[in-house]
Image (cartoon, grey):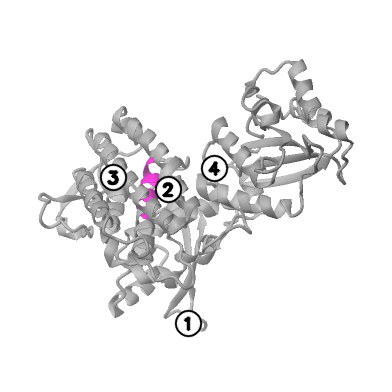
């Protein structure tokens, strides 16, 4: 979230501007989102204000200044704009109202022990560049003539915007990245808007890499999975040779003539550097040799599990697996960071895989869940490494989400899987809350849970053809043992065989 503060000398003029057409007729659907108590609270919320009501709003902002003569340096009116980069989840007016109240309380306009100052939040339609935004016009003179203290207001605004990004699952802006999650630069955000992308390429790439990392059993498979998707991949070899890979870069595929924009793993997230990824894979001498062979090649040398299409019955196995895992998590203390960060990492991979197949280039609640869980999974330098062995069931679920077949009964099973994954999010959120990490707990246990409940309802009322219209499956049978999904019960509870895709319909 980008916050910008400017000062002015006329509340009337600012309100006329906010409710007018704008400098380039960019203002549409002007409406009051919320306001401070001295401006009538929620009474003015909504659109279609009369010219008289608009004039009263402006007069209300100027009233304390005119009554007491208090004249802060730079002007008695503060104009604060809050905007989101393109591709963020849609926020309702109620959510913008919550955000406005949170910001104005943090800035001291609504504080205990002092009289408030007048302010009003005005919403417009999405900007021409796809930015959701809200404007806040506020008086710096309190209703008793006192002055609102604006010392370090920009620093306070940056802090509260970071908290909002975390609790609402929004794009993190560079400079407020927090633990292990690089922020987006203004240049990236501007290019995203200019190219009318749904989200910045770096955000999409991070989910793709996270999916491949969680689903893959070893490094060679990771390389093949990325090369089989929309990702361009290049290794960074040890200086002076090609016998060892020490890093990698990725970019989205481009149209003819366009230059790819490359990002190293560490620019996606701290846990996506190659050394950190290797902590979760099988790395025998033979595995390392096979990985170098794949890194050197421009296409798959020895295709493996990534070419296997699971059976539609796998989805029910995924439901049972997540249910068992959530029950086991009840016995894990909140202080066991290794397990909780590992669970968050693997569950992020589940949602990343599901988002790629179901949401595609239009990221929705699955992508938001993946991104929020990725933030939950990040380690501080002194934290223990996320536990690989404690959470391997989720890797199997991620593999199912990435490559298992769909049939007419799938949506009802997906609804059950969403329910169990929602329980997982709440368990992770409860652990954050117990550790005093309230913002992350709020992000996982509140709004994301509501969005997943809506997704559950969508699954129960839609057909598989409506949900995944592009997937056409033509298959031959192959033995189940080749799949090796890392689920506890895959030998005891499953019979039958799995199938191999001939048209690679799941790799988009």
Residue 411: image location, x then y, percent: 27, 35
Label placed on residue 496: none
Dot in front, 1 or 3: 3
- Residue where numbered disc 1 is placed: 241
Is residue 504 highlighted in magenta? no
- Residue where numbered disc 2 is placed: 444
Q: CA distance from mark 1 to mark 3?
A: 48 Å
Q: Residues within 10 Å of mark 3 (few under 14, many from 20)?
A: many
Dot in front, 1 or 2: 2
Q: Can residue 469 be seen here?
A: no
Q: Quadrant of residue 88?
A: top right
Relative to 255, is 139 above or below? above
Write the start and end of the magenta stretch as one range: 349-358
Determine contact: label 1, label 2, CB under 8 Å: no
Q: Quadrant of residue 345?
A: bottom left
Label placed on residue 420: 3
């Amino acid at each position: 979230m980008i916050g910008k503060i400017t000062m002015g000398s006329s509340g009337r003029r600012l309100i006329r501007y906010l409710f007018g057409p704008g400098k380039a007729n960019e203002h549409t659907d002007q409406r009051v989102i919320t306001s401070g108590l001295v401006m009538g609270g929620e009474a003015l919320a909504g659109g279609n204000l009369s010219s008289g009501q608009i004039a009263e709003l402006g007069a209300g902002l100027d009233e304390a200044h005119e009554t007491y003569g208090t004249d802060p340096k730079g002007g008695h009116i503060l104009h604060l704009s809050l905007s989101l980069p393109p591709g963020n989840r849609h926020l309702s007016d109620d959510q913008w109202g919550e955000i406005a109240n949170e910001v104005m309380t943090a800035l001291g306009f609504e504080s205990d022990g002092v009289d408030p100052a007048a302010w009003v939040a005005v919403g417009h339609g999405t900007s021409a560049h796809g930015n959701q935004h809200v404007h806040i016009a506020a008086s710096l003179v309190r209703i008793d003539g006192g002055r609102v203290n604006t010392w370090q207001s920009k620093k306070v605004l940056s802090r509260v915007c970071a908290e909002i990004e975390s609790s609402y699952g929004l794009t993190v802006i560079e400079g407020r990245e927090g633990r292990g999650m690089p922020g987006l630069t203004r240049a990236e955000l501007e290019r995203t808007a200019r190219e009318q992308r749904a989200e910045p390429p770096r955000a999409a790439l991070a989910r793709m890499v996270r999916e491949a990392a969680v689903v893959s059993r070893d490094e060679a498979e990771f390389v093949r999975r990325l090369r089989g998707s929309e990702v361009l991949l290049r290794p960074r070899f040890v200086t002076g040779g090609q016998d060892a890979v020490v890093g990698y870069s990725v970019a989205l595929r481009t149209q003819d003539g366009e230059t790819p924009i490359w990002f190293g793993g560490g620019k996606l997230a701290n846990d996506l550097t190659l050394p950190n990824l290797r902590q979760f894979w099988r790395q025998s001498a033979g595995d390392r040799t096979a990985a170098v062979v794949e890194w050197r090649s421009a296409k798959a040398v020895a295709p493996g599990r990534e070419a296997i299409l699971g059976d539609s019955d796998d989805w029910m196995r995924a439901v049972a697996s997540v249910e068992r895992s959530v029950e086991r998590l009840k016995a894990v203390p909140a202080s066991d960071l290794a397990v909780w960060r590992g669970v968050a990492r693997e569950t992020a991979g589940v949602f990343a895989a599901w988002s790629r197949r179901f949401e595609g280039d239009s990221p929705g609640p699955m992508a938001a869940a993946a991104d929020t869980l990725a933030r939950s999974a990040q380690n501080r330098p002194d934290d223990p490494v996320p536990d690989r062995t404690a959470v391997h069931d989720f890797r199997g679920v991620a593999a199912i989400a990435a490559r298992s077949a769909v049939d007419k009964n799938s949506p009802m099973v997906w609804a059950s899987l969403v329910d169990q994954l929602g329980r997982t999010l709440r368990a992770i959120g409860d652990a954050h809350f117990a550790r005093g990490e309230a913002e992350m707990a709020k992000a996982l246990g509140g709004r994301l849970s509501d969005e997943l409940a809506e997704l559950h309802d969508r699954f129960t009322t839609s057909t598989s053809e409506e949900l995944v219209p592009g997937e056409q499956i033509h298959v031959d049978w192959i033995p189940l043992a080749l799949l090796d999904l890392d689920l506890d019960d895959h030998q005891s509870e499953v019979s039958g065989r799995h199938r191999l895709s001939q048209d690679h319909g799941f790799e988009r």
